[in-house]
Each structure stands twice: as structure tokens, then as C-alpha cells.
Amino acid sequence: MKPNTQQLNDLTIQVRRDILRMVHAVNSGHPGGSLGCTEFMVALYQVLMDRKEGFDMDGINEDIFFLSNGHISPVFYSVLARSGYFPVSELATFRHINSRLQGHPTTHEGLPGVRIASGSLGQGLSVAVGAAQTKKLNGDSHLVYSLHGDGELQEGQNWEAIMYAAAYKVDNIIATVDLNGKQIDGATDEVLPMGSIKAKFEAFGWEVLEIEKGNDIEAIIAGMTEAKAKTGNGKPVCVLLHTEMGNGVDFMMHTHAWHGKAPNDEQLEKAFAQNQVTLGDY
């Protein structure tokens, strides 16, 4: 049975606390983008994806997901753990030496749920498109999902994959762009203006949808459900998810400053006070 909206919102709060605790404990990591994508990741794993029991790298006969902007690993790890891929207690090993939960996801540690190493930006869409094409060739009707940062689209490899997917009608992929307008050095429009991302994807032959309320669970589910309905029609699908970096923690919002900065003890308590837990902390 799928969780209801209240249960999803409760889980979102718990994931926020996981993110904050993880980066605070080691004084490193990327809370800003992780917090901005929390609602999306919760909705994806709890409602949207057709997942099977257990985990294998082949991902046959199930929907699969690739995180391209791998620096937001805290939200990825938390949602994986709280979706049953590995024990929640393992979150306490984040960024420790020999931990399976490295700062950027890797595969050689064998962490369930992680399909690619994504420390280098710009590569995830190429892998996702390849996986989607493989599913089509194998007669597997399931979908491939991927997540990308808007600043990440400044990497040229993305556009090769975008062009390829449209040319070969890879129409079983939904690539979501975290459109928060911020990256490590400031606003994306100041670092390297990209113009209209929607117009660019459309010009490359993609179907494009926008979710204006990218930090609202119900809006995400509705928008992504619409995106799923657009698959199988000869075009790859892109979703532009309008989010707020640092969402849910007032002093982390409306700034790029928390892209890769951990809160101190006082800031952690203040953030926790804004996100009261209803589930069990690890």
C-alpha cells in the first residue's frame, strides 16, 4: 500500500534530519541541494517507481534511478535506507573511511541502490539513456529515471546525451532537472547563463514538463504522473523541477552558501527545531 500525503510529509521531515545529522557529524557534505530535492526523492521511491524486492545491478523488470548530481548523496542515502535498501543505522557512517556511504556515491563498496559512481558531474544522463535503450532492446517496459542539477547542465556531455536520446527515440526515460538557480559559486545566471532550459530541451527534440511547486509532495506526484503518461510516444521526457536549495531550513534557503557547508552545533539544533521528528531517529 502506498503511503498517504501525511506519511510522505512525515518521512520528508525525517529525511531532512538525516541529511543535517550526516553532514554535521563529519563537518562536510552538501546539505543545500539535498534538502531541495528531499520531497522529490521521497515521492520517487515511495510512490512513483515500480520497484521489486531486493536489489540487483541489472534492474530488469523494474524502474531504475540514476543520481547524476552525486554530491547530494545525503538525501540519496537517507531515502534508500528508509526505503529498505540497507539499515538506517548505517547512515551514521557517512563519509567515514571504509564506509559504503562515501561523499559521492560509488559502486565498488556494493551499496544497494547505487548503480553508478557519480562524483564527476555531467555523466549521469549518458548512463541513464544507455540503460533506457537497453530496456527497450530487451523488451522491458519499465522506465529509467534520472536527476540532474541545473548547474550541471553546463557540462557539455549532457547535450550529447540529450541529442542522442531524441535521435534514437529513447522514450522510456524521465530526466528531472533540479531547477533551483544556484550552484557552488553563486546563481547559475551569474556563473554561466544557460537561457531557457525548457527551450533548449524542446529544440533537441524532448518532451518537457514543469513542476512549479517542486517542494510540494502532491505537486511532484501529479507532475511526475503526467510525465509517465508522456513516455512511449517517441520522445524522451524532461521534467523541470523548480525547487529551493536548503528547503525546510530557513537560514539555508534563498542562498547558495549551503551548497557544500555543514551546520555547526547551534545551527543543527535550530534546523532540528524547524523539523520536528515523528518517526525514529537513527
Image (spheres, rainbow, N blue to C red):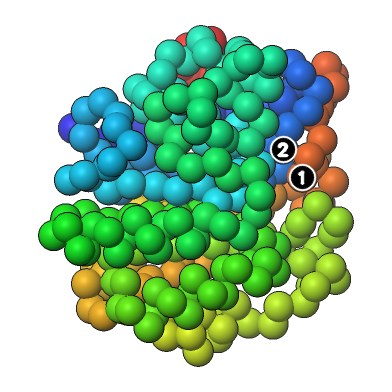
106 lies left or right of 3: right
Please tell me whether residue 197 is drawn above or below residue 23 in the rendered image: below
The quadrant holding residue 180 is bottom right
Q: Position of residue 157 (x, y in %)?
A: 60, 68
Q: Which of marks 2 and 1 precedes in the sequence?
A: 2
Q: Quadrant of residue 263?
A: top right
Asked if disc 1 and disc 2 are in contact, CB closer than 8 Å, the reply is yes
Q: Amino acid at mark 2?
A: His
What amino acid is labelled 1 in the image? His
Residue 150 at x, y percent in the picture: 64, 63
248 left or right of 141 in image: right
- The reply to whether residue 39 is in sight is no
Q: Secondary structure at mark 1?
A: loop
Does residue 158 appear in this view? yes
Residue position for label 2: 30
- Residue at point 71%, 43% (across, down): 32
Q: Residues within 10 Å of mark 2 (few under 14, many from 20)?
A: many
Percent x, y for residue 262? 80, 29
The one of 52 and 219 positioned closer to us in this rendering: 52
Q: Position of residue 203 (x, y in %)?
A: 50, 89
131 and 275: which is toward the camera: 131
**Residue matched to label 1:** 259
Q: Residues within 10 Å of mark 1 (few under 14, many from 20)?
A: many
Image quarter (top left, top right, bottom left or bottom right) of the N terminus: top left
| Left or right: where 158 falls relative to 222 | right
